[in-house]
Amino acid sequence: MVKYPRTAILVILILALFMGSSPGWAVSQKEELEIGRQVQRQLQGQGVLFNDPIVDQYIRRICARILKAAGPQSFPFHFYVVRSDGLNAFAVPGGYIYMHTETIISLSNEGQLAAILSHEVAHITSRHFAKRSEAGRKASIASLAGILAGALLASGGGGGQNAGALGQALMLGSVGASMQAMLANSRADESEADRKGRDYMIRAGYNPRDMYGAFKVMNERSYHFSSEIPNYLSTHPGLAARMASTFGDQANKPPAPVDEAYEAIKDRVLALTALPKRARSVFQKRLEANPNDPSALHGLALIAARELNLTLANEMMEKALKIAPTNAEYLSDMGDLALRRRKANEAATYYEKARAQNKGLAATLGLARALELQGKNKEASSLYDEAVKMSGDDYPEALELAGRFFGQNGQMAKGHYLLSRYFGGVGRFKEAIFHCQTAMSEPAGGTYKISCEQNIRDFKEIMKDAKG
């Protein structure tokens, strides 16, 4: 039996609840935002998200182009990567879009990734999730959270085979009876998302042939879904027919040229998320063909670091950096290795070189950590502020590191406030409430009073809903 992706059931559930095209009951934008936030906290708290600042920065740059092409939106969008060996991407209410790691690995270029993201953006701009059928009408935010817990168990997030079976039973028993009717009408939504998505990506400067190419990959790899999951639970139904109708004019177009920047991102995702044996085999074969392939060397270094072989990781990374000495990704990763070897001075040098090429979150947060270890707290403070501004609530590690730094250096209110955002973002609401309350009790806590009071109300409401 083919094992289905970790988050396949979760994706199915979310789409089933919110993709019905019946106009009988529309959720408000405020409700959409709250649903999206809760789903995000569930995923973040379960540890299924792949939080890598270099990959995140690359994807968000693409998404910014797509959103500009789509026009003004009524709420902000958020984009995340999910650790999963299945091909999928999915959107949930409130502007939250998720891409599976295996999808990134399987596509060929940036345009294909943009095509998938454009399609998901179109689902949200069309407000498909706000049109819920009578069955969806019965699913409150509280019951959604309960069903999500079952979905997370079913998706293999932990607990073993029995937990997975229990999760499937919880989810399918709660809403399975209405799923077929709800998804039977979703092909129209998919077709609308195809058309709008194609328009968005063209206006964003991408080639429409890449949309055909992306969906061709998705269609050919459909075997990743379990044979035990009914056909009507497909998250993207009718791909073959839609390829012929919406993308058919692109079927015979010549393929895109090699996209080296995208290949580097694919290599990074493969090295950091795939089984080491699989990833190592890919990179070793490439090195046999070209011993000076820096991305393959870098990939092997990342695998070695995952396996805690820091000496080998450093050796391979140095080889890659010798071939590509100004590569900001390699420089930042060398800084990370130096920090893990407790060499703060060496780490700072690498991060500074990386920031000279690209002032991204990875190098900025890394340099803040290195300067903190060197006792250069004034410089570190400025960089932590910069990192928090860059990351927002989308990269919790930045909030946690900055919160602990400021708390340890006398800015207690600020430190507790950032930690409250961190714990809230990962679904640990009791800790989030504690840090919000502590932040407000500090002498400088007035700065965060309004935000903390609102967050405490939100967190308590979520906890109340979770108890049913």
Image: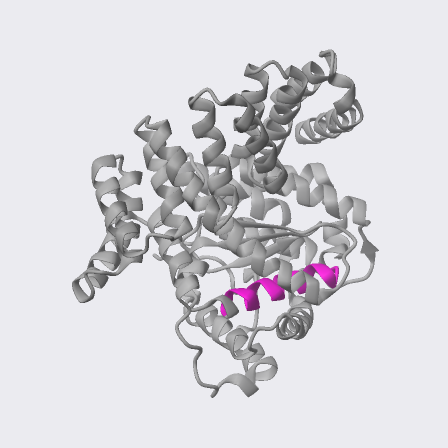
The boundaries of the magenta stretch are 112-127
Seen in the image, is 413 located left or right of residue 49? right
Q: Is residue 357 left or right of residue 424?
A: left
The spot of residue 87 in percent (x, y) is 45, 60
Q: Position of residue 370 (x, y in %)?
A: 43, 29
In the rendered image of this protein, does residue 42 appear above or below residue 237?
above
- Does the stretch in magenta take in 240? no
Q: Residue at x 42, y 72 (%)?
A: 220
Q: Which residue shows up at 56% across the image and 60% down it?
A: 233
> In terms of depth relative to the viewer, which is nearer, 460 or 173?
460
Q: Is the magenta region chiefly helix, strand or loop? A: helix
Q: Is residue 147 visible?
A: no
Q: Residue at x 64, y 23 (%)?
A: 432
- Taking the image as shown, residue 354 lies to the left or right of residue 172, namely left
Q: Could you tell me which quadrant the N terminus lies in?
A: bottom left
Q: Which of these two is toward me, 179 or 85?
A: 85
